[in-house]
Image (spheres, coloured by chain):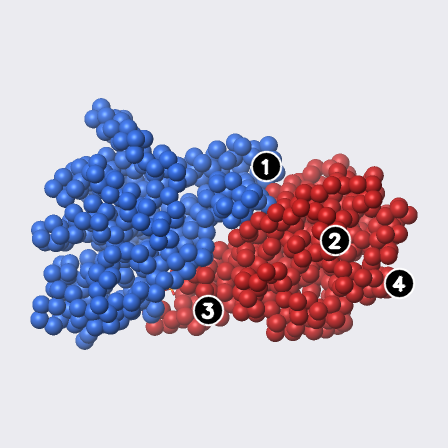
Chain colours: A red, B blue
Amino acid sequence: MDFNFTEEQLAFRDGVADILRDEVTPATIRRRWDSDTGLDAGLSHRLIDFGLPAMLVPEDMGGLGLSEVDFILLAQACGSVALPEPLVDEALVATPLLVEIANTTMTGGERARALLPEVANGTTRVAIGHWINPYINFADSADLLLLAHGDEVHLIAASDAQLVSQRSLDPSRRLSKITWQPSQASRLADGPVAATLWRCALNRGALGIAAQLLGLAEAMLQQTVQYSIDRQQFGRSIGANQAVKHLLADCAVKIEFAKPAVYRAAYTVSVAPARADFAVSHAKVAAGQAALLCAKNCMQVHGAMGYTWECDLQIWMKRSWALDKNWGDAGFHKNRIHEWLLRPGALLGADQTFGNAHLAVVAE
Amino acid sequence: MDLVYSTEQQAFRGEVRQWLEEHVPTTALESFDTAAGFEQHRQWEKTLAQGNWGMVTWPKAYGGLGCNLIEWLIFEEEYYRVNAPLRVNQNGIFLLGPTLMEYGTEAQKQRFITKMASGEEIWAQGWSEPGAGSDMAAIQSKAIRDGDEYVINGQKIWSTRAVFADWIFCIFRTDPDASRHAGLSFIFVPLNAPGVTVRPIRQLNGLPGFAEIFFDNVRVPVFNRLGEEGEGWKIAMSTAGFERGLMLRSPARFQEAAKRLVALYRKKRNDILDLSVEDAVVRCYMDAQAYALSTYQTASRLMSGGNIGAESSCNKIFWSELDMQIHATAMNLLGSKAELEPGCDDAAAELGAWLDGFLFSLSGPIYAGTNEIQRNIIAERMLGMPKK
Ligand SMILES: Cc1cc2nc3c(=O)[nH]c(=O)nc-3n(C[C@H](O)[C@H](O)[C@H](O)COP(=O)(O)OP(=O)(O)OC[C@H]3O[C@@H](n4cnc5c(N)ncnc54)[C@H](O)[C@@H]3O)c2cc1C
């Protein structure tokens, strides 16, 4: 039992976080709002150079062969800077789904295997649509779309789908509603195998959101602590008032107890994505609560300034409000926990904290 | 105690209902934070004024109907029941109006109230400054007496609807040697006066809902001062009492929002997976009722000669938190579609309105004195707890 990240994992995170901090600033994010694609092409290339889209692709398929535990800190770092690019959905959800299909003997396996090298090296971008999300983010910039038809997994060229763009309250998000025609040729997987694939995809998606929400929450808190020091009223920092301290201390408590839940979920998904429901849902709910509380309390501490378009806090708040309801809202995830608790023979109790993952390892 | 509307009150309700049903615009107006929407709302104020409905509590001589507070509540209930346009002149009619009634001279009432009631002049409130938010006594903008005029220099900020408004009521330092609460005066400035610059500030939804205002040797007649020189703080506090207490946010607004929330809940009920959402719907409805009950009680007390004190701070906390709860619950009911902006393909009108209301609800605990400051007031003035 060791709940630490390794030196290498932390160093990798630091390297990526440095780039993100330099290049993904409120100014560059606001520039994206006014651009056609909403993407920063230069940054995408640097992320590809770092091997990020290929992190979870096995080495023999052209990737880095790393795990969800290796990736989770990066997803959190993406949240910290409110990265608009859909890196987390691509690297943690869409690409691993292709890898899983590549590992099957289904006819789609071959297509997925052929595709993975170009996905791993960033020349082909894949977006994913899951029934739980009514819209796909950045579908308009993707080359290929992974889509669900019932339980089946289909892969189509984005140009073969009809996209109707939808405006999100978060101008960094580029949502589309998709209409498309499934065909024999577009089908990659079907049957119970495909149903399990979608279930894993949902867990990966929700895990990625949870980590980003954690990063968003921490970033809002950090900015607001600084603001509470800088802003003076009644001849002293507003942060000197106990009422203000408590607003922000409550945020810190929520974040501290969401963090290990997110890391456990990453571990569980990495050893058994199809058995990670409980851990993922716990992480998603806890991180969502932390981010929503931070948005509310940080706005409050900013006073009227926090209610303006100029104030950069809006970038993080709006992302939090949007992501909290993505890949399953709190109701969906609380309900999964609820069902899990009521299941006959549910593994409950002090000795079962990691029981879910352990059971998965044994069963796999 | 008699919790039944009298025959006269019921008749009044019927009269209001009929007039509103005949006059309320059938298509929703644009946001009053746009130039076009502002003019549409001004036009609506004029329509209201034609029926003398601009501010029903004012005497007939000033364009009102001489109603008492219970009748005002009935009017508000009917107003929100039909989802009539938001009041673009709310700073005028709900805040400055009652203050003018109390502190204004007859000439001032004649000059300012009538045009407020008729919708000809829309008012903004100019109290906050960059360095004076919660600490309003830190106001630095000056109005220095020069014969029959004041010469104004300084800056105000966060003035709601000042981008398109006609007048602003401000607190300025008239005695530069006095400090804090002393030496402040309550003064009106036309926003088109030479030397006034209005810089729009965009709010969270991207619209210029408030403004920063710069005063550069702006001259106004002494006639524009409300009350005595140096009485500004005292008068401002009575305006703030109206703002936090009774007028600015009448219970009907939240009761109707809670009713819409229940309608949304009924529609989505079979998809709800979160017991806490059900609980929140129930709480919102109860709390909206509780706010109405408390307001009726306050109105009854005021009508029999009582007054409103630190409990206006309780009100402000209660309605602002209720408003957040109602809208956050609606967002939870809307789930993955809650983030959609109004007007885009998939966003039914109902969706967009909830999102806008959600963003606005977050400012409730900030404007009209932050909720932290209200809690300090409750603890110190209502409960008598020690000051620092
Ligand atoms: C939508 C909106 C509309 C507005 N409209 C108007 C208007 O029309 N006219 C106008 O004049 N103003 C208006 N305001 C400004 C409003 O009055 C101020 O925002 C408010 O007084 C708070 O001041 P501030 O924003 O400078 O925050 P600050 O005073 O800087 O406060 C920041 C945070 O510190 C806390 N804090 C400060 N001091 C203390 C203390 N002693 N104890 C505990 N906590 C403390 C506050 O509660 C808040 O959480 C509006 C504001 C908003 C958001």
For marks 2 and 1, give the one nearer the viewer.
2
Q: Nearer the viewer, residue B56 or A264?
A: B56
Left or right placement of residue A317 versus residue B289 in this view: right
Q: Is residue B296 above or below residue B127?
A: above
Q: Quadrant of the N terminus of chain A?
A: bottom right
- Tell me the element at label 1: loop
Pointer 3 residue: A227
Residues at marks 4 and 1 on the same chain: no
Q: Residues within 10 Å of mark 2 (few under 14, many from 20)?
A: many
Q: Secondary structure at mark 2?
A: strand
Q: Earlier in the sequence, mark 4 or mark 3?
A: 4
Helix, strand or loop at mark 3: helix
- Give ligand 1's quarter of the image: bottom left
Is the residue under label 3 in contact with that under label 2 (CB below 8 Å)? no
Instruction: Pick the residue in front: A330 or B111.
Output: B111
Residue at screen point 48% across, 58% down: A297
Q: Residue at x 21, y 73 (%)?
A: B217
- How many angstroms separate mark 2 from mark 3 (CA)? 43 Å
* In front: label 2 or label 4: 2
Residue A32 screen position, x and y as percent: 57, 64
Give amino acid for label 2.
Leu
Alpha carbons under labels 4 and 1: distance apart: 45 Å
Q: Is mark 1 within 8 Å of ligand 1?
A: no
Kind of residue indicated by mark 3: Tyr
- Along the line of sight, which residue is nearer the eye, B132 or B222? B222
- Give me the residue at 50% from left, 35% from top: B264
> Disc 4 and disc 3: Cα gap in Å?
49 Å
Check whether the beta carbons of the residues at disc 2 and disc 1 lie within 8 A of each other: no
**Residue position marked by numbered label 4 in the rendering:** A60
As drawn, the residue found furthest toward the top would be: B7
Of pointers 2 and 3, the one earlier in the residue sequence:
2
Which residue has dot 2 on it? A144
